[in-house]
Image: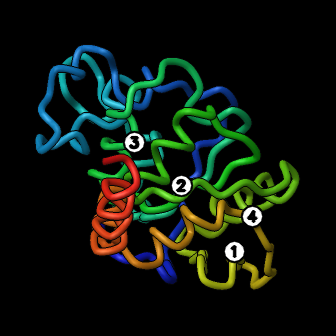
């Protein structure tokens, strides 16, 4: 993973509640390997017509938002099945943070482990940010993980909470396995002590 200290980007508004993981990544793409281009399949059935042409008013097809790295969602974002592939699709498209009032629990956990930061803010704050994005599509939002703040397009600052261990991993750009391996000397020393005690 790449380190995530601070992110500044336009924010892409998905202004609906209960967007589920099957909408984020339809089930027919679950066979794709981990290193496949999941981003190309993101919101496939909402983003394109059956003939493959773009749905013009879908957020990711709007010129100002095509390269957005921050998503804004409604209540219960990414509910439904526990597919980790939904996170891979968001990350593969380029998203690094999703701001919403609430998330599907497993999606939020998978996001933290895959370099996608779920940020919970009050519903009225997210609604305000969605309204700002729709009124000013090129307005930028800043997510500062080190300070644990979000700066909206109008300059207002909103604090957020995040698990301390997940925050550490994201700031350093490491996953749980890399964190464990960074303590291999301590683990080896413990195993040597344990071996002496048991034999």
Query: Label 3, label 2: how many angstroms apart (C-alpha)?
Result: 12 Å
Secondary structure of the residue carrying numbered label 1? strand
Of the image marks 4 and 1, the number of the one nearer the N terminus:
1
Question: Helix or strand or loop: what does disc 2 sit on?
Answer: strand
Up-down relation of residue 57 to residue 70 (above or below): above
Question: What residue is shown with label 1?
Answer: 150
Q: Quadrant of residue 190?
A: bottom left
In space, the residues marked 4 and 3 are separated at their CA atoms by 20 Å
State the residue position of label 4: 161
Give percent across and percent down for residue 19: 58, 28
Q: Whole-Å distance between the Cαs marked 2 and 4?
A: 18 Å
Task: Kindly identify which residue carries mark 2.
Answer: 71
Mark 1 → mark 2, Cα distance in angstroms:
13 Å
Which callout, 3 or 2, points at the residue further toward the start of the chain?
A: 2
Q: In this rendering, would 149 be left or right of 167? A: right
Q: Is residue 124 above or below residue 187?
A: above
Q: Are marks 3 and 2 in contact (CB under 8 Å)?
A: no
- Please report the residue visible at 42 percent of the width from the left and 52 percent of the height from the top: 113
**Residue named by callout 3:** 87
The reply to whether the C-beta atoms of the residues labelled 4 and 1 are less than 8 Å apart is no
Give the answer, above or below, for where 104 lies relative to 111: above
* Mark 2 or 4, closer to the camera: 4
């Amino acid at each position: 993973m790449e380190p995530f200290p601070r992110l500044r980007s336009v924010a892409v508004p998905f202004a609906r509640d209960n967007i589920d993981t099957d909408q984020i990544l339809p089930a027919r793409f679950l066979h794709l390997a981990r290193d496949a281009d999941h981003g190309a399949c993101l919101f496939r059935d909402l983003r394109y017509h059956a003939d493959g042409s773009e749905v013009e008013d879908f957020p990711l097809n709007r010129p100002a938002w095509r390269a957005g790295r921050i998503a804004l969602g409604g209540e219960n974002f990414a509910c439904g099945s526990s597919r980790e592939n939904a996170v891979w699709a968001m990350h593969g498209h380029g998203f690094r943070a999703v701001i919403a009032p609430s998330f599907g629990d497993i999606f939020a956990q998978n996001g933290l482990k895959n370099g996608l930061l779920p940020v919970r803010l009050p519903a009225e704050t997210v609604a305000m940010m969605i309204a700002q994005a729709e009124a000013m599509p090129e307005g930028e939002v800043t997510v500062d993980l080190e300070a644990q703040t979000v700066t909206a397009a109008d300059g207002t600052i909103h604090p957020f909470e995040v698990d301390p261990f997940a925050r550490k991993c994201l700031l350093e750009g490491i996953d749980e396995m890399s964190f464990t391996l960074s303590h291999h000397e301590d683990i080896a020393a413990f195993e040597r002590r344990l071996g002496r005690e048991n034999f």
